[in-house]
Image (cartoon, helix red, strand yellow):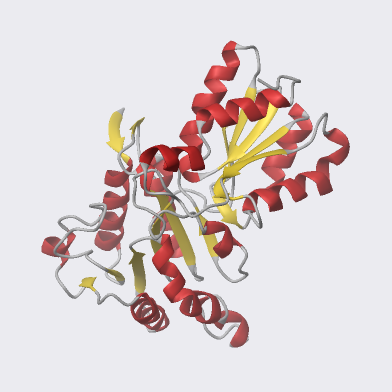
Amino acid sequence: MNKTAYRTAVHDSIRDAMLADPRVVLMGEDVGAYGGTYAASKGLLAEFGPDRIRDTPLSELGFVGIGIGAALGGLRPIVEVMTVNFSLLALDQIVNTAAALRHMSGGQFSVPLVVRMATGAGRQLAAQHSHSLEGWFAHIPGIKVVAPATVEDAYGMLPTALADPDPVVIFEHVQLYNTTMDVESLTPQDISRAAIRRSGSDVTVITYGGSLPKVIDAADELSLAGIDCEVVDLRSLRPLDTGTFIDSVRKTHRAVVVDEAWRTGSLAGEISAQIVENAFFDLDGPVVRVCSAEVPIPYAKHLEQAALPQKESIVAAVRSLFGDQS
């Protein structure tokens, strides 16, 4: 096995895709000479040249639109948006154009576009660079939305997304870039299925992206108290693989949903509704949600940490289902 960093997996996946297919291009702010805000494209400009690695102006509306046009013209663009907050400037292009063109053209056009963006908090980047808005995108028909939480998925979801005829949005949590894992090989991964990251019999904990390591740590701690957690990594937020987590809840009879987004209108709410609609009579207690505080993410480190789901709050949520309110 080789110890590989999440950011290295992202970098190598982009590089391998560009080596394999001359139609693949990368564009975005600082992806070229600077090597990417999180070093995901370091060295690629020197290797592939400015025709395929394009630094863009600070206009998400503009360069995401260029990516859509390039996809319609036969290329396979990877568009990097520096942070999810800035993607709001490109919502018109993603929601009204990329997601809708196949439908509006009666199937005559498809948009094979991949949009990558950093998401989430924990690095003291304050309220305009730290939110988790992937649930907004998961609301939109016509696009696929994925959140790789492991090194294998950081590498393997990109080639599958590039092969898809429709737009795929990939959310890379900022807290994951420096993480490392031992991997045997890196291969293309499914972008439509959830994964069981830890088997258990007492409670199902459902999460995705940057919250997965916290959930695994919480599950390890709870196991010492005799509570056996099954951890479901959603991986794909649209389409949502309801079958995997519903089957898990039917086995464990309890559910906790951990979502770094705000509770109001969250993906955690949709997951909770799916459980109630499909497994209500299998539950031995209410569905519990652990979400971020309903505030803009603070800059101060202690306040930022207090606003986010943490191992301690996940442990407390699980314990509450077993009558422990401590």
Viewer-proximal residue among 73 and 301: 301
Residue 74, image x and y in percent? 37, 80
Vertical comparison of 81 with 89: above or below? above
**Residue at 35 percent of width and 68 percent of height:** 79
Image-quadrant location for residue 49: bottom left
Vertical position of residue 63 compared to residue 193: above or below: below
**Spot occupied by residue 229 in the image (x, y as percentages of width and height):** 63, 24
Q: Nearer the viewer, residue 247 or 305?
A: 305
Please identify the quadrant where the C terminus is shown: top right
Q: Mark yes or no: residue 112 visible.
A: no
Q: Residue furthest left?
A: 46
| Residue 115 horizontal side relative to residue 321, left or right | left
Look at the picture and state if 317 lies above or below 266.
Answer: above
Q: In which quarter of the image is the N terminus?
A: top left
Q: Could you say which is closer to the camera, residue 100 or residue 90?
A: 90
Q: In this view, does 294 lie to the left or right of 13?
A: right
The picture places residue 52, in percent across and down from the top left corner, at 22, 71
The answer to whether residue 302 is seen in the rendering is: yes
Q: Residue furthest right?
A: 281
Residue located at (34% from left, 52% from top) = 125
Q: Position of residue 176 (x, y in %)?
A: 37, 42
Choose top left, top right, bottom left or bottom right for residue 249: top right
